[in-house]
Amino acid sequence: MMKKSSLLVFFAALSAAADVPRPNILLVLIDDMGLMDTSLPFLADDSGNPEKHPLNEFYHTPAMEKMAAQGFRASRFYANSVCSPTRASIMNGQSAARHRTSQWISPKGRNRGKHDPADWNWSGFNKDDVTLPRLLQTAGYRTIHCGKGHFGPFGSESEDPRGIGFDVNIAGGSIGRPSSFYGEDGYGHVRGTSNTHKVPGLESYRGTETYLSEALTLELKKEITATVKAKQPFFAYMSHYAVHSPFHADPRFVSRYEAKEGYSNKEAAYASMVEGIDKSLGDLMAHIDSLGVSENTLVIFLGDNGGDAPMGSVHGHASSAPLRGKKGTHYEGGMRVPFIVAWAKPCKDMHIQKLFPIQQDVFDPEKIASVHDLFPTLLNLVEVEVPDGHTLDGSSLWRWFAGAAAVQPQRFLMHFPHSHRSSYFTVLIDGHHKLIWHQMRENNKRFELFDLAKDPYENQNLAHSRPELLKNMRQLMAEELLSADAQAPMGIDIKIALLE
């Protein structure tokens, strides 16, 4: 039996813990922002230090630079190469192979290629699914969605983000992109008639000169203010529509890029959109500071898939140069995204920051993490357990953020049994080895194998020169896919294709 004095200490500790406010969370997700779409370098030189490339000199993202200086960023942070699979993985901590929202969701009807699995999860989440905002609600969080949803088609339970656990929805729905970023166009309601691309809500901004990224930022600031005044912790999911097409210049910034030689008007417009979301990041962090909660607010910034800047070829070294490929492809430029994590105001004496420290001004060029890891990382922070029966493919990243030598497994699986820019493929990255399985190709063209340590830009296919490595990687890929009960294109048997 516990002694009286011990009981007093125990209950005092419980009381003290109850008095400690839960940390706020701001997760900023940028649509189609690749690793090179920033002035902040995410690639390393031969010594492992950040190294700028020509595209970094083109963009201007001071808020990202400031956030990185007070936090931690990674070069090898992976996402799915199209948007809806990534968004689902953030919400439930599973790979696309497991949750089966393995393709982008067309709002009006199931988008399915000739060989696609017939029953991939086009309808998205339902009311019984485990999701991050639902679990945060159980811990007392006010959950705020702002911007692009794209969790399910028109008429589905997840069309409105409130259907997956958000208390507030600002401008989110089934659409994957707006028909216009301009308030003068009503973001598709004044000019632009396709229901598929009209941004829901934001009525008070229609007909004004407010660019879409700014309208979203203003509305999210209002909701954060209301939540702080109510003395409630917030989970704010800022999911920008930018920098997805159409590439509509942000008039606040475009003049900076129009003056640069060697770039087209469309490229200048794209760069202005990038600067617009960077300003949003800076404005949100400044607003949180003005409310007096920055020391207790975690900020995560990332992209949802590889870049799609309007320059160069899809599979070559162009819009993500020197990385190969862009959005929708199986190459690094289609899968690697910018990732920064920081406390909004670092303070070594803050209780929550002592428990969950983040290295400052640290860049990791080697270790792997992915969108699968955000779900367990945030639940770890708020001390919410993963429900029984819910399988995770990710793991908590806090030891990595703190600088521990031992970190999460260095493996990433991306499964895409669909038609797109690159069609019917699976990627497995294990450390520096990368295997691409082209599911519909003949034997001699079925596999690409790269050593990313020696060949980071994927120029030399080792599939024929390294047969033992190929065999081992095929075995690992088969194990990962079969353990997730992954779907395959019609007529393809995963065991036969990978193990025989």
Image (cartoon, grey):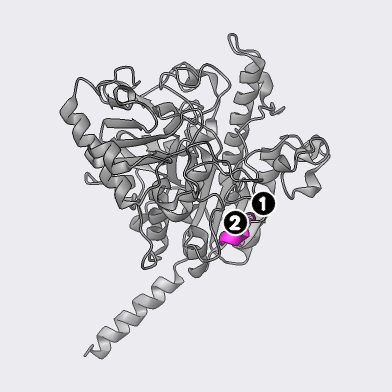
- Please identify the quarter of the rendering in which residue 20 is found: bottom left
Q: Name the residue nearer the viewer: 341 or 17.
A: 341
Task: Residue 405: give x, y in percent of width and height.
Answer: 22, 44
Tell me where the magenta segment starts and ends, as one range: 158-166
Residue denoted by label 2: 158
From where the camera sits, is residue 137 visible?
yes
Q: Residue at x 29, y 85 (%)?
A: 7
- Please identify the quarter of the rendering in which residue 458 is found: top left
| Residue 154: image tag | 1
Classed neighbour count for the residue bearing mark 2: other residues with Cα under 10 Å, few (<14), some (14–19), many (≥20) = many
Hey, what amino acid is under mark 1?
Phe
| Residue 136: image tag | none
Q: Quadrant of the image for the N terminus?
A: bottom left
Q: Secondary structure at mark 2?
A: loop
Q: Residue at x 40, y 27 (%)?
A: 331
Residue 37 in the figure: left or right of residue 500? right
Residue 25 in the figure: left or right of residue 380? right
Task: Residue 15: give x, y in percent of width and height.
Answer: 40, 77
Residue 43 in the figure: left or right of residue 405? right
